[in-house]
Image: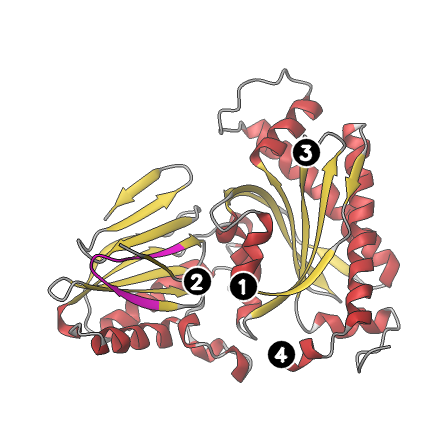
């Protein structure tokens, strides 16, 4: 697998950045519609990271994050995370459920938890469906699941399969933020290593050197 | 006092008064060994139960698998002056962070990691004196080589000492 990562040059990284751009762009649009506010996103970061570095992207292994995770099956298997911090989750719920912004107690009701799960589901769904349209690949998302816990504990779940093949992961990370930064977070796509061959060939991108 | 950080799929040891720390254990298991007489503590951040799961030789990091990490930890601690027959073990982690894939074997990895660690420790004849495993919460652990106390922090339950 290490050999495989060596084949990824600047051109291939650009292609993956575009993959993140298209996916997260659609998801950001969906979020903007939900919130009826403007949502911006940053240029996707595509990096080959060691396992310990991944959690640093969202503020460190111990940072508490609200995450919707789902597994992608089909032609292009991988793990997909929608990650926001606790304050963003709170602001998101306040805006969507139309309740008065109360004190953030750290505890969420059943209603709030299921709302967050549904938001994550909608956003990740639009990320993946735009990706499927773009590549012509068959992508099947699993049932999503929500967890609120330490970033390291959550993200490591997406690394287990990769751990059997090496010590690094290629991640496509796109940060997004609502205009006033009340809601901000990340879309994280960690494709399984075998996936890249199919992904690149579906896009007509060669995997043998730089172009 | 120094706090030595153990990363994912890594292992290490410390002498009193130093401490060992690993953050964000989810389905991974933190294995802690302690020789109270020599005041030497060891810690491994185990990610997978068995090295036979490795799909390529490049994935064969010793600290990653229960069956390779624990013997290596014992060996390194022994070199540092600890005696295996005096060692006791504590386990933390092995949680199920997302509930929906309980049926999927690959993703039921937390409990499998815990089972593997137990069986490797039994083979090495090291008694497990405390266990804080399972559930669905992430844990950060810190081992004090002076006292042998393991501090376990979770988001919702604060810090617990075992």
Do the residues at pointers 2 and 3 share their chain?
Answer: no
Do the residues at pointers 4 and 2 share their chain?
Answer: no
Seen at 10% across and 64% down, the residue is B37
* Mark 2 crowd level (few <14, some 14–19, many ≥20, 10 Å Cα): some
**Does residue B61 appear anywhere in the picture?**
yes
Do the residues under discs 2 and 3 have CB atoms within 8 angstroms? no
In space, the residues marked 1 and 2 are separated at their CA atoms by 9 Å
* Secondary structure beneath label 1: helix
Magenta residue span: B12-22
Judging by the rendered image, the residue that carries numbered circle 3 is A183
Occupied quadrant, residue A68:
top right
Occupied quadrant, residue B123:
bottom left
Judging by the rendered image, the residue that carries numbered circle 2 is B7
**Residue B109 appears at what percent x and percent y?**
46, 62
Do the residues under discs 4 and 3 have CB atoms within 8 angstroms? no
Q: Earlier in the sequence, mark 4 or mark 3?
A: 4
Question: Tag on residue A51?
Answer: 1
* Secondary structure beneath label 2: loop
* Secondary structure beneath label 3: loop
- A22 relative position to B26: left or right: right
**Residue B139 appears at what percent x and percent y?**
40, 49
Judging by the rendered image, the residue that carries numbered circle 4 is A2
In space, the residues marked 1 and 4 are separated at their CA atoms by 14 Å
Q: Quadrant of the C terminus of chain A?
A: bottom right
């Amino acid at each position: 697998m290490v050999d495989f990562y060596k084949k990824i040059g600047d051109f291939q990284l650009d292609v993956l950045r575009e993959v993140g751009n298209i996916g997260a762009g659609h998801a950001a649009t969906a979020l903007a519609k939900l919130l009826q506010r403007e949502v911006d996103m940053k240029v996707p970061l595509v990096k080959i990271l060691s396992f310990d570095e991944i959690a640093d992207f969202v503020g460190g292994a111990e940072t508490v994050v609200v995450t919707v995770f789902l597994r992608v099956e089909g032609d292009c298997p991988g793990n997909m995370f929608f990650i926001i911090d606790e304050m963003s989750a709170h602001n998101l719920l306040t805006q969507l459920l139309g309740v008065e912004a109360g004190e953030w107690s750290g505890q969420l009701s059943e209603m709030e938890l299921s709302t967050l799960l549904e938001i994550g589901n909608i956003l990740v769904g639009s990320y993946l469906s735009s990706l499927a349209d773009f590549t012509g690949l068959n992508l099947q998302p699993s049932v999503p699941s929500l967890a609120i816990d330490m970033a390291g504990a959550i993200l490591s779940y997406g690394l287990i399969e990769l751990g059997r093949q090496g010590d690094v992961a290629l991640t496509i990370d796109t940060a997004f933020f609502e205009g006033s930064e009340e809601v901000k977070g990340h879309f994280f796509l960690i494709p399984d290593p075998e996936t890249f061959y199919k992904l690149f060939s579906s896009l007509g991108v060669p995997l043998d050197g730089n172009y | 006092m120094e706090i030595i950080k153990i990363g994912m799929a890594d292992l290490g040891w410390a002498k009193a008064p130093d401490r060992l720390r690993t953050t964000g254990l989810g389905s991974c298991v933190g294995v802690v060994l302690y020789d109270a007489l020599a005041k030497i503590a060891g810690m491994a951040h185990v990610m997978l139960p068995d090295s036979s799961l490795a799909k390529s030789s490049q994935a064969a990091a010793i600290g990653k698998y229960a069956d390779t990490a624990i013997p290596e930890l014992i060996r390194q601690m022994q070199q540092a002056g600890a005696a295996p027959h005096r060692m006791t073990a504590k386990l933390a982690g092995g949680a199920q962070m997302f509930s929906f894939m309980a049926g999927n074997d690959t993703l039921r990895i937390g409990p499998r990691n815990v089972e593997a660690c137990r069986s490797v420790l039994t083979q090495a004849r090291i008694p497990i004196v405390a266990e804080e495993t399972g559930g669905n919460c992430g844990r950060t652990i810190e081992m004090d080589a002076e006292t042998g106390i393991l501090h376990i922090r979770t988001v919702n339950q604060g810090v617990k000492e075992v």
